[in-house]
Amino acid sequence: MKKLLGIFGLFVFIFVFTALRSPNFLSAYNLQNLVGWTSLFGIISIGAAFVIITGGIDLSIGSTVGLVGSLLSWLLMHKGWSEPAALLAVLAVSLLIGLSHGLLITKMRLQPFVVTLCGLLLYRGLARFVTDDESQGFGSAHDGLRRIAIGKLDVVGGFAVPVSVFIMVGIAVAAAIFLNRTIWGRYLLALGRNETAARYSGINTDRMKITAYVICSLLGGVGGILFSLNLNSIQPSGLGEFYELYAIAAAVLGGCSLRGGEGTILGVIIGTAVMRVLYNAINILGIPTHLEFAIIGTVILAGVIADELVKRIATKRRAVRALSGEP
Amino acid sequence: MKSKISARTFLLTLSIAVAALFTACDKKPEGGASGGKKKLAYVTNGVDPFWNTAAAGVRAAEKKFGVECEVLMPPKGVVDQKRMVEGLLARGVDGIAISSIDPKNQIDLINEAASRCPLITHDSDAPESKRLCFVGMDNYKAGRAAGKLVKSALPQGGKVMIFVGRLEQLNSQQRRQGVIDELLDRPALTTGVTMKTDPNGFPLIGEKFTVLDTRTDNFDYARAKANAQDAMASVPDLACMVGLYAYNAPQCMEAAKEAGKIGTMKIVSFDEQEAVLQGIADGTVVGTISQQPYYYGFESVRILAGLANGDKSVLPKDGFLEVPIVEVTKANVEKFRVDLKKMQEAGK
């Protein structure tokens, strides 16, 4: 938990800073939007975290989002599939994507970077080909289904929580239990730290790695469903572009080490929230949009540097204390 | 295990490769029309439903003028566009119509292409290049027309915010300036690449209207929607949202719907996405400015087909063929929709 203090501090800082500068930031409407977007990006970031924990990388998340989103509306609107059938089909597609990544990486011994980079190109191309590169959308149909992405549930106090938040929390809790409370989670962390050692101690590392890639792509697929339902206007060439970077950045900000073996789900959610709050703050404070990348880059870099410095000071103090024999 | 290549073999191979390269470069690519139909190319500035309607115009003109025209949509901006044009030149075509993404800096590429085959611009001009003519509309005028729609919806004035994909493009700058100038009751400007634009990020205050900043999203629909949401959150008395690109207004509509402001929030759009046309019919969108992309495609192919057959009379006077804009409001939306559908059918 201590490791999360830095990123949580950054989150609180941006949050309080923006709230003090603009009263509208704390309006229920804005907070609803904020948690809504955080949930969508949070779901794909949790997926990214699983792969990163094994020491791998998935660059195809954005394209998976794009393919699943495009396929969903294409199946529903052009092929006339029923909602459950279309949902099952697109989830199966994302599962297959993850499975093939995992198999190629473990059985063929290909590098995750190469496999998923090719995936990035392949799934984007497929999305554009299947839909003939035409914009997809649900029009005013499927309003019931769209409620899982844009619907809100009233809770006490007049604050309506977007349904997507519950989906994200459900996924996050399941993921956290999987990672911290089951033996498979232990295996994942162990193999991320030292794959050879894990294999020698009897862990079927290949199977765990494949599982991680399947989880990642599956959550990318869930993200694709939610993004497409939320936006109602899907461009096969554009939906989800660069989202793998948002996901990887959120996971790393939240404490996942790119070398593998480290990471918590709560950290990933906070990492995602930092990114979303930054984008939101820039709009709310009326900072010109062409400055946004510069601001996001600077704030995150400053936060990470501060975090690192604090950690170093703490380690030094601990070392001094240990030497002087204090408790 | 490693086999070494001798220096002599290496040099020999290298010199053969270089020689082959030179002979290949020397050979001029043959024209695409080795008997049969003339081959043309229609290059867009990106992938967008807008261009699908233009492609329908291309298809219709292909049939009418007996030519073949390939429609190329570069997904990644300038780099892809360059790659595609180079590919066309290498294969050899009898005419190219291109929408210039960066008119100032693409002049070399456009002139290079223009030296090898008839070349015209459409949608976005490159006035300083050697293109033969430009097929398009006056984006500034279109912006002013959109401004008039805002005025009609809000006679008492109010706060307005503009949403767009990218502000670097000339057409978005001109549209934005047109909207601003109309709302602030400024005299009409003559347009050109060097047109002065108001800096972004500062509210522009007129007698009745205040134009707040212009938010960009880099073609990320989720950002486009979040921008609209954030605008409503930060400016509670926002009265009107103007979407300069086709997808902007639909995202504004989604955001307004969720905020319970659909109908009260005035939304003005560009282009003809189905969601917007439905919104106009339902009364939730004030209106949209259509550039009639179908005619971009149709007229471009008509001119190129003429040029490929040696007929120079197809070139418009002053090198500019203006495709008139259409203001779509509740009064004419049904007819517009029917016509649009007909055009799209004709293109299939």
Image (cartoon, coloured by chain):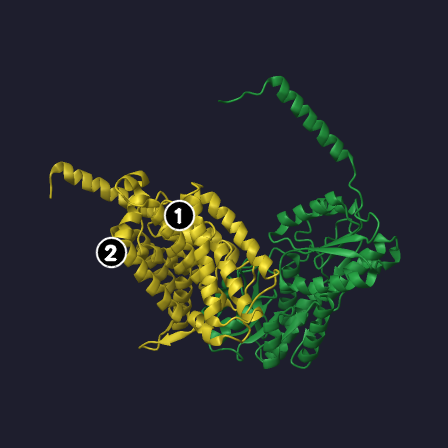
Along the horizontal axis of the image, is B182 left or right of A117?
right
**Measured along the vertical axis of the image, is residue B276 above or below residue A312?**
below
Circle 1 crowding by C-alpha within 10 Å: few under 14, some 14–19, many from 20: few
Q: Residue at x 69, y 74 (%)?
A: B327
Q: Secondary structure at mark 1?
A: helix
Residue B182 image position (x, y, % from top left): 65, 70
Res A265 quadrant in image? bottom left
Residue B211 image position (x, y, % from top left): 56, 68
Q: Residue at x 31, y 61 (%)?
A: A174
Check residue A181 in the rendering and tell me which mark sits there, or answer none.
2
Q: Nearer the viewer, residue A57 or B82?
A: A57
Q: Amino acid at mark 1?
A: Leu
Along the horizontal axis of the image, is A210 left or right of B184?
left
Chain rendered yellow: A
> What is the chain identity of the residue bearing mark 2?
A
Along the horizontal axis of the image, is B285 left or right of A142?
right
Question: Mark 1 = which residue?
Answer: A301
Q: Colour of chain B?
A: green
Q: Nearer the viewer, residue B127 or A36?
A: A36
Residue A230 seen by the camera: no
Q: Secondary structure at mark 2?
A: helix
Ranked by sequence position, the earlier of labels 1 and 2 is 2
Residue B248 image position (x, y, % from top left): 57, 66
